[in-house]
Amino acid sequence: IDLIFNEKMVTVEIDPVGLKFTAICTLILYIKYYVVLSIGSGKRFKSGSRSPEDVMFCGSESRAQNFKVASISVNTSPGLKKAIEQDLRYQRIVANDLENVPLFLLFAWMSLICMYSLHAHLLFTGTFTIARVLHSYVYANAMQPHRVIAFLLGLVSNAGVLCNLVLGALAVH
């Protein structure tokens, strides 16, 4: 890739394997995010926490939609308790993705320009992608300590791809 900086042409080489692998992992994370949003939207219908005008999309088996704040009392039916828990669980999966995935993608794509090691880039990018998919699955299914392990794998992978980026930048002459 040729870039112009201060009226000078600079050629930046991007490893084609790293580029393709990063693009595929980005696609996987994008698809996973929208699958989680879709499932979470269904959970919101079941808990009644969508806006009232969304009732037209609910179907006959859903409860009334009224921005229900997730409050559980001793009188709450077991079905509604479960629906509220699943609604909140999916909201937290989405929030956790929004806290972790964008920074990782920024670091991963930046590291293609000046990575220190292609092997490290592929390892950390692949591990992060797998860890985030697993994190969503185990969070949705209330699986501990699996959730913490998946989260920590993602966190370490994020730090790893950032270190690979920084080391690569420092190695540029």
Image (cartoon, grey):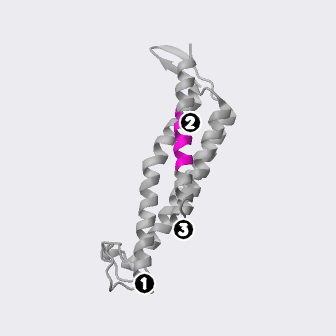
Relative to 78, does residue 37 appear above or below in the rendering?
above
Categorize mark 2 by other alpha carbons within 10 Å: few (<14), some (14-19), many (20+). many
Query: Any mark on residue 78, and which?
Result: 1
Residue 144 among those drawn in magenta = no
In three-dimensional space, the C-alpha distance between marks 1 and 3, rounded to whole angstroms, equals 17 Å
**Disc 3, disc 2: CB below 8 Å?**
no
Instruction: Report the magenta residues as a range.
Output: 152-162
Between residues 29 and 10, which one lies in front from this camera angle? 29
Query: Any mark on residue 141, and which?
Result: 3
Callout 1 amino acid: Pro
Residue 41 in view of the camera: yes
Residue 156 among those drawn in magenta = yes
Relative to 33, does residue 166 appear above or below in the rendering?
above
Between residues 12 and 37, which one lies in front from this camera angle? 37
Secondary structure found at label 3? loop
Residue 44 in view of the camera: no
